[in-house]
Image: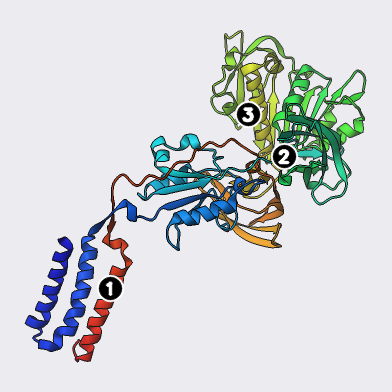
Amino acid sequence: MLVLAVLLLAAAVAAGTYAGLERLGTRGIAPAVFRGVAWAALGLLLANLSCRREPESVRPLVLLDASLSMRSAGGQWAAARRAAAGLGGGPDPDIRLVSAVPGASDSAPSGGRSLVAGALTAAAATARPVWLLTDGEVEDLAEIPPDLLARTGVKLFPRASRPDLAITRVMGPDRLTAGDTLRLEVDVRAFGMPDRRNVSVEVREMGGTHAWLRGAVPLNGGAGSVVLRGKLPEVAAGPHLLAVALRDAGDAEPRTDLRLHLLSVTPTPGIVIVGAPASWESRFLFRTLLDVAALPVRGYFLMEGSRWRRMGDLTAATAAEVERATQQADLLVLLGEPDDRWRRSTHRVRGRWEWIAAAKDAAPTDGDWYLAPAVASPVSGAFIGLPVDSFPPGLALATLTPGPQDWVGLNAQLNRRGAEHPAIVGRDSAGHREVQVGVAGPWRWAFRGGSREQGFRSRVAATTAGLLGASDSVTGRARPVRAVVQQGRPVVFERARPDSGPAGIELRITGGAAATRRDTLRFDGAGRAELFLQPGRYEYRLQGGGGGVLGVEVYSDEWLPRPVALTERPAAAPLEPSRTPARERLWLFALAVAGLSGEWWARRRMGLR
């Protein structure tokens, strides 16, 4: 009725204008018709009237899972594509790819994860029948509301079982010093290969011909792991992308037989610990730094007389080697009674961490010194939520006198009574950072385990990061969170400083299928930006300086078989008929423009304005 009223009103106004005001008689029929058409279309658009549309007349929305598992060994991507075209309705089916990489072609799956909850939620807002075509191996089933899943049609295309050997994990150091020992932990899983008892693994540089490490992984119950050890070959300093590969896997999915690991070889150690003489403090500190620091760590301790040993493997070292390492280190850690020459010749180090409680001229006071974090310092965040005052007390405390610009990390109190005395003092002068520790015995935190060990590790990590300023050697305004990512997953960059630089940073990428690629990193509110790349080795350079090496693996967790989490069900129609508003009809806008143009043309022909 409202539509008819709008049409009659438009016709009456148009006729009254030309018959009553213009008095053109039959000459005004043509412009009156054009004006009536235009005003009728504008009236419908202004009122935004809607018409009822029954659920049966709504074209279904088809969500097609485009994760990599759909084209794995035994996958049914082609069958799913044909079924999606049949469910879409009509010659132009409405098919949306789910879990696909942004900007990727729709001819093959590309997503590194099977995530469908967000797409289903958005599809439910359209009030259309929804179909989900997938292999059923979705990761976020628990995030899908049950009522939404109940009204979604599901057609399954499960992959056929195929025998497979896969390297599921490679763990190792990110940086080593030339001449160090490389240790890589490799995990292997077998799927559908019950008779396989071991598999050979080889490590070489990507594109290289010389094997760095070799070993065999024993399989027990379809899984196994091995630690490959070997001295670093004589290679140039810089990043090296290592390929960890299975030999003679004999399986149906070769894309799971190769993993990548980025290793940076530095000419000198990043962190050097000197214990003169050896002590429990230096031993526990060395072990903790190996776990929490990103830079290579090398330690030396002095035996009786003047004999030096390397921490870790206890091999002999010369005094010249120790002196050279202390002069070239980024962070120098001194415990005990180090030679005064090292203190005088270490002006090039970025940071120095010195325990002075064991020094001869320190004159520490023995007793039970209970520690407590200071109000604000670069290391105070390491003790949040930890009952530091209940940790084992220090055994002795040397006198520290902080300057006006110095910060205090921990305070000590004798037997929990009396005045507090600074136990850790730090300073930053002209880019050189220094921390002095006046308390002896905090190594007992690590010895006790539990929250005490966590407190020790947190303090070591926070102090190391503060002394170095940034433990990553990648310079520039942004750096990758992970230098090696799986296929179908983004390389995530984060700002070096959250509040620095413009919203976008240009970068140039070389390698992979394209010789050179230019792109722009656009950061979100959390200071992170994503970049999707095809499998391969890449070198990148950032605008304003800085760069590095990236690796995108052929491997993906999507290649591994997983249980089917969904069951097939028909699609339910929307609970209520939907309505289509007039402003969604584009032809109404075109009709209004045509009517106004036709009236102008007719009036010009009649000599009117």
Using the rendered view, name the quadrant where residue 538 is placed: bottom right
- CB of mark 1 within 8 Å of CB of mark 2? no
The x, y position of residue 196, in whole percent, is: 79, 33
Quarter of the rendering occupied by the C terminus: bottom left
Quarter of the rendering occupied by the N terminus: bottom left
Residue at 75% over, 31% down: 194
Of callouts 1 and 3, the N-terminal one: 3
Residue 486 placement, left or right of 605: right
- The amino acid on which the numbered mark 3 sits, given as a three-letter code, is Gly
Q: Which residue is mark 3?
A: 403
- CB of mark 3 within 8 Å of CB of mark 2? no
Residue 285 placement, left or right of 72: right
Q: Which residue is mark 1?
A: 591
- Nearer to us: label 3 or label 2: 2
- The amino acid on which the numbered mark 2 sits, given as a three-letter code, is Asp
Residue at 58% over, 50% down: 530
* Mark drawn on residue 164: 2
- Nearer to us: label 1 or label 3: 1
